Image (cartoon, rainbow, N blue to C red):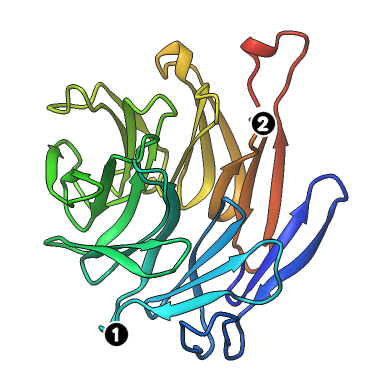
Amino acid sequence: MQNYSVVHWSSLLQRGQEVVNVARSVTPTLKISEPLSRVQVSSMAVKENLILLGGFDGELLCKCVNQPGVAFCTRVTTEDNAITNTVDTYQSPSGSLRLITANNDCKIRVFDAQSFTRVSEFSFRWSVNNTSVSPDGKLLAVLGDSTECLISDSQSGKVVSSLQGHKDFSFASAWHPNGLILATGNQDMTCRLWDIRNPSESFAVLKGNMGAIRGLKFTTDGRFLAMAEPADFVHIFDTQSGFLKSQEIDLFGEIAGISFSPDAEALYVGVADRTYGSLMEYKRRSDNHYMDSFF
């Protein structure tokens, strides 16, 4: 993803192909939504055969991977500085596929992925920089311009827990596949780990080198946690060691995002540096000791 373009990179063929370009006006294929002018992409997610894009002016766009064009697009808010900070999909407790957005206008919005109708809207006291949904679809982690992180009910929006410990604003979160551990990344240069069964205090604090923690991802098997700083450093922690064993990847450039492959065999790091912009791929090392390997 870069400004107005989304490119699919094939690790097998070692080449990329543009799949979405929103540098000009966007006309959706579904008549239930209205065209948008040029969209500068601020956030992205790819899940369940859907590509979701958020924009700097509060836009939400949805493209089906196997269909041409953008299926649905809308501006979820018209307020100034209402950047769409997070877009994602999840399965609701009833089994329905949902789309979720978090915006600077202090709101989280939930859409039905079939009809693209808005089904929920939750308001908070501060700008929401990030939200993530627990694996069972029942809980929302809500982070933003506050030292506290909230756990809310995904259907009612009611706050059920307040996580206290960070010293600045938060920007990233990730749920362990077991649904019991939540990782939160903050501008205080730390990632805190919480057991949601005992949310009164974090059970571990992982520290960065020089900047805020802007990206967090667990592997699908829950074995590793990747933690990205704004530039130069990505840290990988072994969850089976109680997050005590780690590996540091020292690269050059601003980090646009991180992601593991579905089989947990590769880590991808997007570098947004104007000169050295690239997508870096790291393979998991086996050495005949698969369960003890690092990247």
Task: Report the residue marked by disc 2.
Answer: 263
Report the quarter where the C terminus lies.
top right
Q: Give whichever of 146, 86 is nearer the camera.
A: 86
Residue 262 lies, with reference to residue 3, above or below; the image says: above
Q: Give whichever of 135, 295 is nearer the camera.
A: 135
| Within-10-Å neighbours for mark 2: few <14, some 14–19, many 20+ | few
Q: Secondary structure at mark 1?
A: loop
Q: Quadrant of residue 261?
A: top right
Which amino acid type is shown beneath numbered disc 2? Asp
Q: Quadrant of residue 78?
A: bottom left
Q: Please indicate whether residue 181 sits to the left or right of residue 15 in the image.
A: left
From the top left corner, tell me how far across and down residue 235 is, in percent: 51, 34
Q: Please indicate whether residue 292 sits to the left or right of residue 256 in the image.
A: right
From the top left corner, tell me how far across and down residue 198 is, in percent: 17, 22
Report the quarter where the N terminus lies.
bottom right
Task: Report the residue marked by disc 1.
Answer: 78
Residue 250 lies, with reference to residue 271, above or below; the image says: above
Q: Earlier in the sequence, mark 2 or mark 1?
A: 1
Q: Residue placed at 46% from the left, 61% from the top? A: 113
Which amino acid type is shown beneath numbered disc 1? Thr
Q: Give whichever of 40, 165 is nearer the camera.
A: 40
